[in-house]
Image: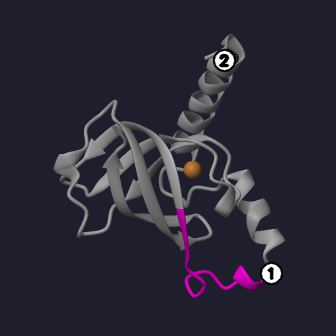
Amino acid sequence: MTQNTTAYASIRAATTALALLVGAAAPQIWPSESRAEMNMPGMKDKGKAAKTASGTGTVFAVNAGGRSVTLNHAPMPEIDWPAMKMEFPVAAEVDLTKIKTGDKVQFTLTGSGNNYTVQSITPSR
Ligand SMILES: [Cu+2]
């Protein structure tokens, strides 16, 4: 890790925290994802054109009861996302007892727009 990377991560985390505060009840809007939609006219109709993407990251928090996980994920070029920290809903089939905070993980998502659900997540050992 370079110092630049660390500083960048801190800025991203602060930005994410602010976005969560401001948009607690509203859909989360990430600039990069808005751009992704503009680049893909066929995906304007959200919910019909689901995509699948795989990624890697570190588990920031697991909410087993709420069926969600917060990940610091690496860039995901398949869906044009930069690295960021974000919370995802988790599909019912996913066993959340197999991951814990701090784990490095590989995961897959399906969804569209700003709404992606974790379909699988496993520690990368
Ligand atoms: Cu993200």
Dot 2 amino acid type = Ala
Quarter of the image containing the N terminus? top right
User: In percent of the image, x 68 and y 46: which residue is there?
Assistant: 82
Coordinates of residue 112 in the picture (x, y in percent): 58, 73
On whether residue 45 falls in the magenta region, the answer is: yes
- Dot 1 or dot 2: first in sequence order is 2
Q: Label 2 near label 1: C-beta < 8 Å?
A: no
Foreground of the two, 86 or 22: 86
Q: Secondary structure at mark 2?
A: helix
Foreground of the two, 10 or 81: 81
Quadrant for residue 11, please give it: top right
Residue beneath disc 1: 41
Instruction: Describe residue 119's horizontal placement relative to residue 94 as left or right.
Output: right
Label 1, label 2: how many angstroms apart (C-alpha)?
A: 35 Å
Dot 1 amino acid type = Pro
Foreground of the two, 18 or 110: 110
On whether residue 125 falls in the magenta region, the answer is: no
User: In percent of the image, x 63 and y 34: which residue is there?
Assistant: 15
User: In percent of the image, x 60 and y 84: which residue is there?
Assistant: 49
Instruction: Describe residue 79's horizontal placement relative to residue 124 as left or right.
Output: right
Residue beneath disc 2: 7
Which residue sits furthest top? Answer: 3
Coordinates of residue 92 in the picture (x, y in percent): 24, 69
**Crowdedness near tag 1: few (<14), some (14–19) or many (≥20) residues, C-alpha within 10 Å:** few
Quadrant for residue 41, please give it: bottom right
The magenta stretch spans which residues?
Answer: 42-53
Q: How many marks?
A: 2
